């Protein structure tokens, strides 16, 4: 099976076109050599793939006949990626968690929803007597005017 079709069939890439493009960009290799899309994959090959700024390594156990369901993928490949690579990915995701400080720039959708909920709850109080709302009574305001 061709390597572009293999990477698509084991669900490493969403489409075969993306798989082919990544191979053209020299991000996929078998052993130590960079491959072309037409390279045939054999059982026992170790494929190195550069994706999301880390290097994945997968070992081919079996060649599938067509695209697999996600649950069947472990029957056809074995992940032999270094643990340091996954730790690197985890650290990068954590560092990108907040790309801006809270309150800076345009509100996110979540911020907007929180503001809408706050405004709706505030309006729900529905004060009709503004003197009661501000805590003033008629007696206090008259005594201030007398002084």
Image (spheres, rainbow, N blue to C red):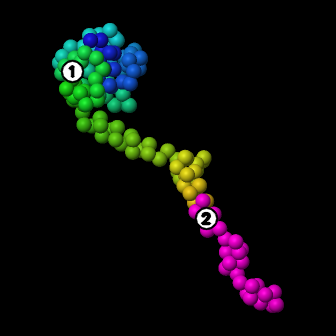
The N terminus appears in which quarter of the rendering?
A: top left
- The answer to which image quadrant residue 45 occupies is top left
Q: Which element type, helix, strand or loop, lies under badge 2?
A: helix
- The answer to which image quadrant residue 67 occupies is top left
**Residue 25 visible to the viewer:** no
Residue displayed at 47% across by 47% down: 98
Q: Position of residue 90 (x, y in %)?
A: 34, 41
Horizontal side of residue 43 vs 100, given as left or right = left
Horizontal side of residue 140 vs 146, given as left or right = left
Residue 125 falls within the magenta-colored stretch: yes
Q: Which residue is mark 1?
A: 60
Residue displayed at 81% across by 86% down: 145
Asked if marks 1 and 2 touch (Cβ < 8 Å), the reply is: no
Whether residue 69 is situated above or below residue 2 in the rendered picture: below
Q: Which residue is mark 2?
A: 124
Q: Earlier in the sequence, mark 1 or mark 2?
A: 1
Whether residue 132 is situated above or below residue 9 in the rendered picture: below
């Amino acid at each position: 099976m061709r390597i572009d079709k293999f990477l698509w069939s084991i669900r490493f890439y969403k489409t075969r076109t993306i798989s082919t493009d990544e191979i053209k960009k020299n991000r996929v290799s078998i052993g130590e050599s960079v491959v072309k899309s037409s390279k045939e994959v054999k059982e026992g090959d170790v494929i190195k793939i550069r994706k999301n700024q880390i290097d994945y390594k997968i070992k081919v156990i079996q060649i599938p006949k067509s695209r697999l369901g996600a649950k069947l993928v472990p029957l056809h490949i074995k992940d032999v990626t270094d643990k340091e690579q996954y730790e690197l990915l985890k650290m990068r995701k954590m560092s990108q968690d907040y790309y801006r400080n809270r309150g800076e720039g345009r509100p996110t959708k979540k911020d907007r929803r929180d503001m809408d909920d706050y405004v709706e709850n505030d309006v729900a109080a529905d004060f009709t007597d503004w003197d009661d709302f501000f805590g003033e009574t008629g007696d206090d305001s008259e005594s201030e005017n007398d002084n």
